[in-house]
Amino acid sequence: MANGQAPSISRTFITGLWRENPTLRLLIGMCPTLAVTTAVKPALTMGISVIFVLVCSNLAVSLMRKLIKPHLRMLVFTLAIATFVTICDLFLRAFAPRMSEVLGAYIPLIIVNCIIICRAEVCASKYGLVVSAIDGVSMGLGFTLSLCFLAAIREILSTGAIFEIPILATVGNGGWFVPWAAMRMPVGAFVSLGLILGAVNVITRKK
Amino acid sequence: MLKWLKNFVEQSWLLIAASFVFGLLLALANLAWTPRIEQNKIDKLNKLMGSLISGAEKFEPMPDGVTVNLGRGKTAQCIVYKALGGDGTAKGFCFIAEGTGFADKIELVVAVDASFEKIFGFNVLSSSETPGFGDQIAYPFYNDQFKGAPADKLELVGAGDAKQIDNKIVAISGATVSSSAVVNIFNNYLGRIKQALVEKGVIQ
């Protein structure tokens, strides 16, 4: 997304989903990608939280963009991001306490997620409200889909289920599938993500 | 001075204004959701304690906490809850116990009978033990060994009959540190709390 004329809404939307997908193409936001993808439910919750924070912080930064002094911009960005992350954290603790416990410190850590500050700097501080909001939704959706895809692979191989719904009959329940405990651990995250990134590189290789 | 002040206001007015607006947003969210968050904590504790003591309808925190020595110079303040049945009779005692696990702190909700002679069981309140290994402290193989065990000094053993209920707790294969941590938590808390309840005349 270059300086100058605002990009079209459709182009902005597609950019975050694939061409500049934060996880698969830009390789940013790796900490939650590796940490919360043991199952689809926490991955989806993290994704929705990031969409909320991205959209709100992009809107706030876009609203203030003509007033922000360049040397103070990081302070203002961080202030906006920290506010919306704290609101998101309080909301989860109030209405989804179980998920809040599962995600633990990773919700407050959204404050230092590179995706949020990157979009504030690259998009929201330069363009209007509509483009900034679409960019937030698009980047957030791209992040959420990547997280859920990785989490689905890890969950089915580690428990034989997706969304806690049994798909493969495990040995413990008289079936054939032996769950891979390693997929629930960090090694499972690194190996799965490595294979997915390899596949993405093959798909996008320029001929 | 006036020039400096003018420069300061010019540079920082947006930051100050934004701080007020965002602070107000946070205050409103906090005001709206804090009662629900506190209620969630109470509900979770009551649910965990209620699942351990059958027939208990109410949990009353006892006055004055008990100071427990966790070793290595560390102490913890523990609140003991008295479990009461519908007719007001004591059904047992519950408390939150903590100790160091393999990855991080382990917090347990422990329940014992009204005469402090037998353990009713425990639930894991929070832990970061390794998935697939240390987190098996919550699984029946390990957890069930505590149900009915004497509320006395427990001993961790590497092998044995896990179905035999006594003071010997069989460790989880591949998670000896987590298994040992739970036994240590029981040993740190049971004796001290029993002593405190005897001193207060709550039990004999």
Image (spheres, rainbow, N blue to C red):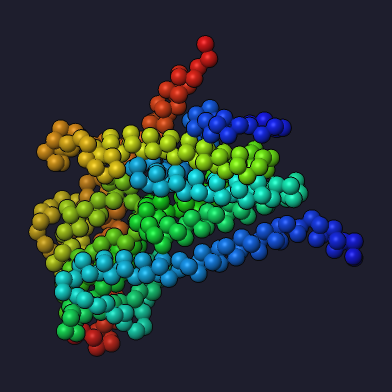
Residue B157 appears in the picture as rendered:
no
* Viewer-proximal residue among A34 and B113: A34
Place residue B16 in its image quadrant: bottom right
Residue A207 pos. (x, y %)? 52, 11
Residue B57, percent from left and from top:
21, 76
Residue drawn at 66 percent across, 42 percent down:
A128
User: Which residue lies at the image location 20% right of the left edge and 61% below the top edge?
Assistant: B155
- Foreground residue among B162 and A129: A129
Can you name the residue that lies furthest to the top here? Answer: A207
Q: Quadrant of the N terminus of chain B?
A: bottom right
Q: Residue at x 21, y 66 (%)?
A: B51
**Quarter in which the C terminus of chain B is drawn:** bottom left
Percent coordinates x, y for residue B28 in the rendering: 54, 66
Q: Quadrant of residue B98?
A: bottom left
**From where the camera sits, is residue A165 visible?**
yes
Residue nearest the viewer, comparing A146 with B155:
A146
In the image, residue A42 sits, relative to residue A138, either above or below, namely below
Q: Residue at x 56, y 50 (%)?
A: A56
Left or right side of B71 for B56:
left
